[in-house]
Amino acid sequence: MPAIKNNPKLWLWLLTTALLLTTSTHLLAHAQPTTLGLSADLSLAASWRSDNQQSNQAIADEEVWQIPGVLMGGHASNYEKHTSLDELSLAMHYLTDKNSYASLKIGSHGGTEISLENALFGQAFNVSNQPARIEAGLMTAFFSPSNHEHPSTTLFSLPSLGYTALLGGHVQDTGIRAAFGQEARGFSLGIEANKGSSYPASNSGGLYTAYLRHAYQGFYLDWQLQGWYLDAEAKNRKDDRSAGGHSHSVSTNATGFTGSYKGDTQAAGLFSELQWNLGHRKALKLRSEYLQVNAEGLVEDESGNRQLNLDGEYQSLSLEPSLLLGLHTFGLRYERLSLKNTLTGAAASQLGAEANLINDGHEPQRFSAAWKWQYTPNLALRLEWVNDQTLSDHQPKIVTLGATWKQAITLNN
């Protein structure tokens, strides 16, 4: 028992097995997707911004954008001046009358090439009169609602600062997922066991998540509360945003820290959303999320001759109040990071500076305001203002004009 108690990965595997064994063969109508037969969803988001997130010197030097004080990678990307395609995604689904389903999603974010994002199949069941499902394939993790959001689905065009800095923008990997309970009402839970080939893991190190959720829908009040945990192992993880890798940078020739990280990343978070319904198409909403991330491992240069031990403690806080008035939504968002590293070893000072792990006490923060107008059921227009204090040496104030388009398509029944 002591070995199990100290091994969170084993707990997740045991919980997965228990859920699979208790799943009955009685099928349930409530599943994802919900449209019988073949259907599709098309999402687009584009923005014009008044300034770059990087300084002119950093752009001229073709530096990979990085927040000092934390190793970054995955899908973490910076915004650029002028017009950008924030999102283009096409998701296709097929649902049978036996509640088996498959989904395929291709997309492009930040003007990058179109790539495969999701390719999964699943089965919905009924367990003790409650909905449940099992899914496998390439998936975007569902441990937090923030992890599977996109510019077309949110009030703000920029992704979460905390997820960008600490979790590579969003966690996406190949694995298996089991979920139980009605996500819209009451308690629900889910567990995910992934291969671990994507950030914050690497080289099939393993990535596991679990979440517990409670949701309520009333006449005057709605809420959702979700706590989650993530455990990832990195084996020789590099920043693949640099040239020759999975680049989301301003330039495909950009280069960053060429060394690697080997170690563990544990993260936990609490997501909440509270909505007061004030009348027909009138509501006041408060959304927040707190993240705690710990990274413990070995950082070494490209040659492997210089090493340092990293013990990182990072926190992220996001607060987002908004007001819905008919077709218009007005909102504010405040985001703040706390980044603390303990670096030890003979090369700690020099290698720590090269890896950009020293932030001299600067705590990144960002304040945003937005107005979104749902001009038609498909088309929305938005105006944003951002005071970006993510970096200490370049803190632009950005005006953003943007538009989103969402269309659900039923191909056959």
Image: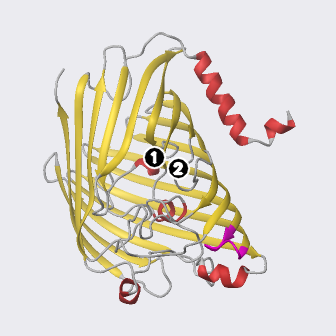
Q: What colour scheme governs how the chains and residues are painted in the rendered image of this protein?
A: secondary structure
Residue at disc 2, secondary structure: strand
Expressed as whole percent of the image width and height from the top left, the position of residue 379 reads 16, 52
Q: Residue furthest right?
A: 2
Would you name the residue on which mark 1 appears?
145
Residues shaded magenta:
299-307
Q: Is residue 395 above or below residue 311?
A: below
Would you name the residue on which mark 2 appears?
271
- Which residue lies at the image location 79% right of the left edge and 36% below the top edge? 4
- Left or right of 119 in this view: 216: right
| 352 or 169: nearer the viewer | 352
Magenta highlight on residue 234: no
The image's mark for residue 311 is none
- Quarter of the picture containing the N terminus is top right
| 370 or 108: nearer the viewer | 108
Quadrant hosting residue 246: bottom left
Alpha-carbon span between mark 2 and mark 1: 8 Å
| 3 or 396: nearer the viewer | 3
Expressed as whole percent of the image width and height from the top left, the position of residue 394 reads 43, 86
Magenta segment main secondary structure:
loop
Q: How many marks?
A: 2
Disc 2 + disc 1, Cβ < 8 Å: yes
- Left or right of 46 in this view: 397: right
Q: Residue furthest left?
A: 376
Residue at disc 1, secondary structure: helix
- Which residue lies at the image location 50% right of the left edge and 14% below the top edge? 129
- Which residue lies at the image location 45% right of the left edge and 76% below the top edge? 255
